[in-house]
Image (cartoon, helix red, strand yellow):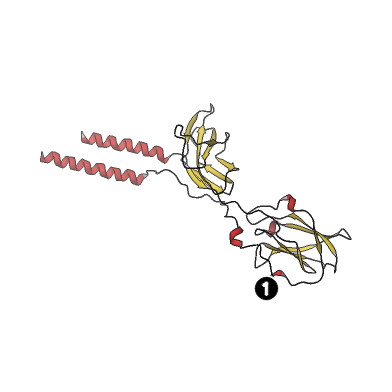
Amino acid sequence: MYRVYILLFLAIASSVFAVDSFQSILQAKKIGDTAVTVSWTPIPEATQYKIFYDESALLEPEDPRLLFDTDYISTTEGELTEITPATEYTIIVRGYNAESQEIGATLPLHVKTYSRAPDMNLVRDPLVSSDTTVELWFSRPIDTTKTQIQLIDTATKKPLPVENIKNSPNDLRIVLVTLKTKMELDGQYELTLQKVTSLDGAELPAENRIPLKVVYGGSLPPLDTLPLDVVPSPGPLEEEIAEPVLTEPVPIDRLPQTGPASIFLLFLIALGLFFAQKKLSKRA
């Protein structure tokens, strides 16, 4: 009789743990300051999904659903936007059939958004350090491969060809614009920041892309060669760089799962109980 109970116990345990093992897994693919992108494994027979989230790890006491939810989507990837920086969120995805009936849900995921990045702007007027070089200082490190800057001679209305745009080797917030032709002494020019992109993907706002007046008044030592007590600093770099945006899946924070190792442990316990019972029966 005891054998029957032990085998029944193992069968029930295995079926319960098998359900947990196949539950849909939710993970974060990208985390920013005001957005989180998540993906999940398909929920069987689900044709549409909703993402539920809350600004804490707590659920409503009378309703296990989270406080906020998105519209229905048919893909297994979604993005939460316009959420709060530096805030912890609990996220769960629920699957629905064609009749909009809930048929399953993912395991919950806990993520925290990053702190808001500092505003992107030009922190000082352009400096003409030589007849072929203009230096620009920004509030955030700049990706010069995605930056476009134009310099026009106000007298001839012709643009000066740009040879290259690169970062200062000492500070990634400083951009050096090198021209193919020399500027005339006391010549007046108009510099336009057509597109400026930071290393973390932010673009310079349109209101900061207005034309700037530039006058070449003679050769000046470049900012990189000036003493540190002479050059005004835009501030410590480490205080202004935004926390990195994740572009790869991050480890998920989910409910405890019981896998094959735990099932094997339960089998050993049941086996021990069986032999102990058998020994006691012989003594009796």
Q: Nearest the camera: 18 or 32? A: 32
Point out the image quarter for the N terminus: top left
Q: Which residue is mark 1?
A: 227
At horizontal 17% and vertical 40% (from top left) the residue drawn is 278
Residue 85, compared with residue 156, is above or below; it is above
At horizontal 31% and vertical 45% (from top left) the residue drawn is 264
Q: Residues within 10 Å of mark 1 (few under 14, many from 20)?
A: few
Point out the image quarter for the C terminus: top left
Residue farthest to the right, as pictured:
156
Residue 232, compared with residue 89, is above or below; it is below
Q: Position of residue 127 (x, y in %)?
A: 75, 65
The answer to whether residue 8 is left or right of residue 64 is left
At horizontal 25% and vertical 37% (from top left) the residue drawn is 6
The answer to whether residue 127 is left or right of residue 108 is right
The answer to whether residue 282 is left or right of residue 224 is left
At horizontal 14% and vertical 41% (from top left) the residue drawn is 280
Q: What is the tally of numbered marks visible in this picture?
A: 1
Q: Nearest the camera: 61 or 78? A: 61
Q: Position of residue 197 (x, y in %)?
A: 68, 55
Residue farthest to the top, as pictured:
99
Q: Position of residue 58 (x, y in %)?
A: 46, 40
Q: Which corner quadrant of the image does residue 221 belong to?
A: bottom right
Q: Position of residue 25 (x, y in %)?
A: 47, 42
Q: Amino acid at mark 1?
A: Pro
For label 1, the SS is loop
Q: Nearest the camera: 139 or 106? A: 139
